[in-house]
Amino acid sequence: MQANVGRGEPVDRGTSMNRRVVITGMGWVTPLGHDIEEVWRRLLAGESGIAPTTIFDARTFPTRFAAEVKNFDLRRFLGPHYEQHRTCSRNSGFALAAAEMAWRDASLDGAAGLRPERVGVYLGSGEGPIDFDNFVAAAIAGWKPEQRALDAIRWAQVAKQRLTAVMEFEQEPNCAAGHLACRFNAQGPNFNTLTACAASTQALGEAASLIRRGDADVMISGGAHSMIHPLGVTGFNRLTALSTRNDECATASRPFDRTRDGFVLGEGAGILILEELEFARRRGARILAEIIGYGSTADAFRVTDMHEDGRGAIAAMRGALADAGVGPEEIDYISAHGTGTEENDKIETLAIKVVFGEYARRVPISSVKSMLGHLIAGAGAVELITCVLAIRDGIVPPTINYREPDPNCDLDYVPNQARRVPVRTCLSNSFGFGGQNDTLIVRALS
Amino acid sequence: MNPRRVVITGLGPVTPIGVGVAAFWNGLLEKRSGIRRLQAFDPSYFSSQIGGEIDGINIGDYVPKSYRKAAKIMARDIVLAVVAAHQAVRDAGLRTRCLLERGEADGEPNVDSTRFGANIGAGLICADLPELAEALSGAVEDGRFSFARWGAEAMNNLTPLWLLKFLPNMLACHVTIVHDAQGPSNTITCGEASSHLAIGEAFRTITRGAADVCICGGAESKDNPMALLRQELGQRLSRRNETPAQACRPFATGRDGTVISEGGGLVILEELGHALARGARIYAELVGFGAGHDAYIAAQPGPPHPEGRGLRVAMQKALDEAGIAPAQVDLVASCACGLEAHDRAEAAAIRSVLGPRTEDVPVMNVKAGLGNNGAGSGAIDFIAAVLAVHAGVIPPAFNSNPVDPACGLTLPVDGPRALPVTTAISTAYALGGGQNAALVIRKFSA
């Protein structure tokens, strides 16, 4: 799928030369709702899904707000299938609900020619939240302050009483992909990747590669995550990665703005149905867009920081462009990783300038994280859905809370107002903690 | 079929019976067991008190001097991956940043960093319990955990980089930094199937031209109270505490469960022309990869499909891709964890794919002496298979006598057995979650 970037060698696509990958269905669960059209309307209106944290008592945490999923009832999405999935973790539930919507959107139920071993799942799904109260009870019981050591016997006594097999095993990061396979009888390739904030973009890129290579005809792909739990927020707060604007939380997520002070945790899922083009055509599927390019790289620089020249981000975007066989000027819209951290937004801007040259100043760039927060592993899939909708409707979502320009971020971030603009081809970036970079390119089907 | 062929040029096993190819292979041939009463913590309150442990790892021996301080933010899983990477790269004769800086290689790098990818399987990494328990204890008020106190002060007892110790993609992150691998990078989190899926995906990455060399496999440690408790809650573990070396009994009558462990393996996959151009030693050629899902019972912990449906799909796809008929298979390197339902499901898949050929094909397994570490186990199984093909010797299975007649397999219970092996298939399944994968390797001939 990916070209021999910069080598001038012919691209080998083996037997898969003509297999193209299209998107035929989409579903999401987000802090602004669970319906494609409703959430899209709210994104175009510049609404924020961010509010004080309710999932746990965060009132003394450095960050006391998040973009939570509200009014979520898995039973409503799964109907008669609910029973066999009712013990799943929060993120698996998000994935199931989004997949149910996407599957229906693609009209795949009973579709002709669907062979179970040719239907796969590739998610970038996070671990389930830990069983916090019971975990803490065991940890406290086992800690012996006088020896500064954990007494494994005392720990195990409490842990065995309070922790359960169901809660522990449903936390495993491969469970969401397993639930989806069972729900849709998908016996084909089944993967879960967890490359932090890049995971679901990577999942979609690799899922498209599997179809192109001939390993599957249909892939259910995307991601889901919730890190809005006490230890998740603790971890990001200790890293000082989160915004701490507790008094103005609805405007706290400020990608590319000079006053940005960190990202806002979100949660949810985005799932897309990917199909081989001819397979989709044969069954008369409605085709939403085509995935034409994917690039993946590692910064190989530092655990804590992005490479200061944006080395990995540049290579990921260039890899995707080469794979797609399109020039930078053919990109009509960039869905930025745009987290709202000082470092990401500055380096992403720099990387876009290197890849796009003069055209960087003209291409609209926005970050829906300004409204949805950062869904971590699930972010890329939700953002790719917004790209497909932008192509469909010829309108791009805004970056809200953009007030003060930053000299390091001097591009067109579609500030505060959605914009009507013809969109045929979009590029979507996701960069993971630790330096994993992934870029996808989608285009209207021609 | 694929003009770009992929060969295996380096192996880095890290196991309780040996680190590095020579120690590991000799251990297998000598039927050594690395299973003992756990020493990492006091296991007295658990019903299974044994496991595979690796002694004497000093991370400073495997990274450049300048990188030693990073060891502070490495969970045990990450340490194991970094050790495996060093072993694999050195075994392959690659001159990477790490080996050059350590003075273990001279001259210029012989791999282009931008064409050097990584794909590493990882587990749900357990937080360091003593570290977290001590911090959590700082938030206790009147004998109970106080969110208010945790958020306001006690969380600050955790090191700022605390979260980064446990993100699954940190295995790949550290490895790519240490060896300067800037190509496509992924982290697969699918339990015991992780390594095979990672190796299979790296194979695809090279085939499609996105990289020339990939370091791939997986690593995990289950040698901590939390992981042991999870396996115990899942009723997966042997209680033969008095006879650790005989506890894990793959495919044997009277088996009573698997044994936890730690370890992993990374292998170097290389495009054939690249390997030939630098005169690399070629262990074997990777010729087929397949993946499949049981699509059976979603709720966890759940049983495997009794007929091993997903594994059958994976094996069939891998053989089809390789263009190899069942009659040409000389060796099956099984996953064989020593759990009755899983062993029988795997055996059913093997019988179904090989048909009448089953009775003539030896099925090897190495878990009896190594235990099951999760995400890194598959890479160890795969490395053993590669060495068997390369040496023409099948290491003895032990603890597999008498063989469960319900499995209907031919095991090399005596041995080691010299047998020309041209083609082998290596299998893997996740104990929970339903993922399966298979890899087919062939003795290399130009």
Image (cartoon, coloured by chain):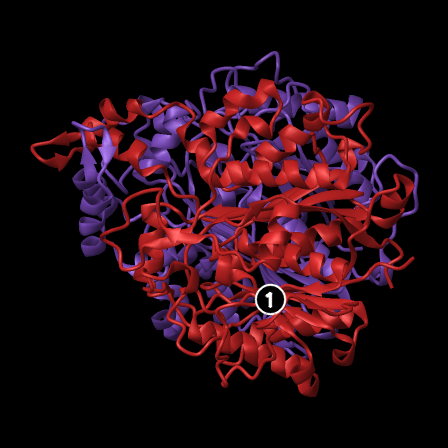
Chain colours: A purple, B red
Q: Position of residue B305 (x, y in %)?
A: 49, 76
- Read off the residue under disc 1: B396
Q: Position of residue A401 (x, y in %)?
A: 47, 25
**Left or right: residue B207 compared with residue A111:** right
Image location (x, y in percent) of residue A121: 58, 61
Residue occupying image coordinates x 23% and y 40% = A139
A188 vs B311, nearest the viewer = B311
Vertical placement of B393 versus B149: above or below? below
- Image quadrant in which you'd find residue A75: bottom left
Q: Is residue A223 left or right of residue A117?
A: left
Which subunit holds the residue at mark 1? Answer: B
Q: Position of residue A193 (x, y in %)?
A: 56, 49
Residue lying furthest left in this view?
B142
Name the residue: 65% across, 84% down. Answer: B359
Q: Quadrant of the C terminus of chain B?
A: bottom right
Of A400 and A206, the residue lying toward us: A206
The residue at the point 28 percent across, 49 percent down is B43
> Farthest bottom residue?
B356
Up-down relation of residue A56 to residue A416 (above or below):
below
On the image, which quarter does residue B116 sit in?
top right
Above or below, B324 against A303 in this view is below
- Does residue A256 sit above or below B33 in this rendering? above
* Amino acid identity at mark 1: Pro
Locate residue B198 relative to residue A290 in the image: left or right.
left
- Judge whether residue A423 can be spotted in this image: no
Check the picture and name the quadrant holding the N terminus of chain B.
bottom right
Count of marks placed on residues: 1
Q: Is residue B224 visible?
A: yes
